[in-house]
Image: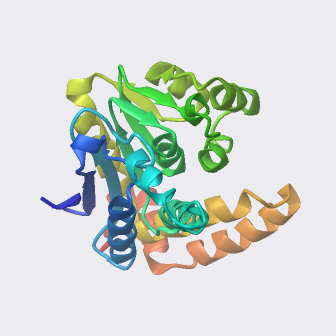
Amino acid sequence: MAILQMTQRGPVAELTMNAPERLNALSDEMLDALQTRLDQLATDPKVRVITLAGSGKAFCAGHDLRQMTAMRQAPDDGAAAFKDLFDRCARVMARIQSMPQPVIAQVHGIATAAGCQLVATCDMAVAATGTRFGVNGVNIGLFCSTPMVALSRNIPRKQAFEMLTTGGFITAERAETLGLINRTCAPEDLAKETAQLADLVASKLGAAVKIGKSAFYNQMSMTPADAYAYTGDVMVENVLRDDTAEGINAFLEKRDPDWDQ
């Protein structure tokens, strides 16, 4: 069985990390599979939304500690291999946010360390009640510095720092309150709830969502004045599209838009 499985459901690509015996750890193989598949989907005009789930009893337990232990056997104590690992993980995270399609995490069980980073990196996330989230590398003497980047951009600073320095878990309900995830649901409803969110987003004009996602992340590092100037240009680009004109006319005429998507 492939380490990363994909099911195409109309305009939604459903990805499932499939290494349940290792709690879907972000091993070399998993990172390579994610990078390859995401790069392929980024150029697929038929895909408007991507969901990401994990098989077995957990979403993702972070980096593969067995592989990391083996890296220490290199002459340089694995420094080059570790740097390559964290760089490749960062590229996967960057790829998720640079995708033209929204990416929704479907989370259950646990999402720890780089697995929590993965949730924080996705554009949206739905979690089953009972799911636990943590950046608990500090418990084994490894501060989660790279997961911290995504986490601290999702939740309040002091809450992120507490999670990072105590290694404690938070519940799905707490994660929703803090803004790490969008919503919670019963475990038996997780796939349906995620699919409904994906289908709702996929029903919108794909070109508009693509333009908007890019603008969303680009403006975050700007001053408000620069962000308004930039997003004003983005709005002009969007409003001048023929399919946007069709959407506006359809609204005024109280009918559904005739979009090819």
120 or 193, which is in the foreground? 120
In the drawing, does residue 83 fall left or right of residue 246? right
> Image point 57% across, 28% down: which residue?
139
> In the rendered image, is residue 135 in sight?
no
> Image point 32% across, 58% down: which residue?
256
Q: Is residue 77 above or below residue 210?
A: above
**Residue 189 percent across, percent down from the top left:** 23, 28
Q: Quadrant of residue 142?
A: top right
Q: Quadrant of residue 207?
A: bottom left
**Residue 147 percent across, percent down from the top left:** 59, 46
Number of dots carrying numbers = 0
> In the rendered image, is residue 164 in sight?
yes
In the drawing, does residue 161 fall left or right of residue 187? right
**Residue 54 percent across, percent down from the top left:** 28, 44
255 or 95, which is in the foreground? 95
233 or 106, which is in the foreground? 106
Q: Is residue 226 above or below residue 132?
A: below
- Residue at the outermost left position: 1
> Image point 48% across, 35% down: which residue?
182
> Image point 60% across, 66% down: which residue?
76
Q: How is the image coloured?
A: rainbow
Q: Quadrant of the C terminus?
A: bottom left
Q: Quadrant of the N terminus?
A: bottom left
Q: Is residue 75 above or below residue 200?
A: below
**Residue 174 percent across, percent down from the top left:** 53, 20
